[in-house]
Amino acid sequence: MCSLERRHIRGAQMHRPNPIRLVLLTILVMCAFAGNSLLTRAGVGSGAIDPAGFAMIRLASGVTMLAALVIWQGRRVPLWGWTRVAGAISLAVYVIGFTLSAQTVDAGLGALVLFGVVQISMFGWSICTGARPSWRQWTGAGVAFCGLVLVLSPGPEVNVDAPGLMLMTLGGLGWAAYSVAGRHATDPTAATAANFLLALPIVALALVQTQMTITPHGALLAVISGAFTS
């Protein structure tokens, strides 16, 4: 075997994703995603902070953390381009729907609806754009759809707030659009920092009210959600 072929094989092995690392990262992301549901419900659902205050503190904390990481690594935050516009608007839609729904929707139920809507929406988008899903992807989408139908069709003993579920569905659609818009980002950390920054005024205009309720406990939950789990 020539040296060129050996270098090609070594390069392919170096760029091959580690399945264990991928699984662990996926678990970490899902735990953080679920953590946002718990934190938002604990803050907004308990009345410790209103939706506008939670959403704005969450985004501001996320911007601060991400911008610090980008600057520390010697890079810049890109604030211009159609990708930024799409990212900021879709992120704002997610935050608005997700935060408002936390007033009436249980964290566990809301997370299930959110996950299902995101997965099904992105799967449908892939098909519409010409992708050919594998049988595993079809199976996963089918399970997600069946789970979503089951969650949205509870028994008579379960009280489900329909407007809250509609808001959570809106949040899921926003997050799916945000994921699609950012899938080709060359610098995900910097792009996310820019999206958080640009989404902040949109969320403030949509949710701001004259009387806001922000307790230290509620503000702390919003900071943890923005700076860590988000």
Image (cartoon, rainbow, N blue to C red):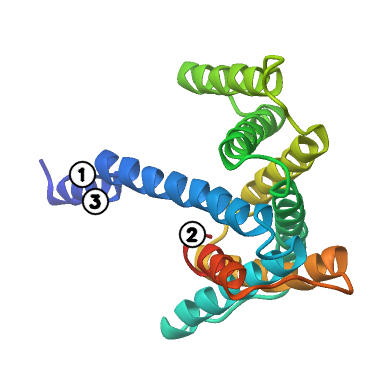
Nearest the eye: 95 or 10: 95
- What's the residue type where badge 1 is placed? Ile
Marks 1/3: CA–CA distance: 9 Å
- Name the residue at 19% across, 51% down: 7
- Name the residue at 58% across, 36% down: 115
Please state the horizontal and vertical placement of residue 91, each as a whole percent of the image. 70, 57
- Name the residue at 80% across, 70% down: 204
The residue at which mark 2 appears reads as 229
Q: Looking at the image, is mark 1 or mark 2 earlier in the sequence? A: 1
Nearest the eye: 222 or 129: 222
Disc 2 + disc 3, Cβ < 8 Å: no
The residue at which mark 3 appears reads as 14
**Looking at the rendering, which quadrant does residue 195 occupy?**
bottom right
Marks 1/2: CA–CA distance: 38 Å
- What's the residue type where badge 3 is placed? Met
Q: Secondary structure at mark 2?
A: helix
- Name the residue at 56% across, 37% down: 108
In the image, is residue 86 above or below residue 1? Answer: below
Numbered disc in front, either 2 or 3: 2
What's the mark number on residue 9? 1
**Looking at the rendering, which quadrant does residue 208 occupy?**
bottom right
Q: Secondary structure at mark 1?
A: helix
Left or right: residue 104 compared with residue 62: right
Nearest the eye: 164 or 84: 164
Q: Looking at the image, can residue 82 be seen? A: no
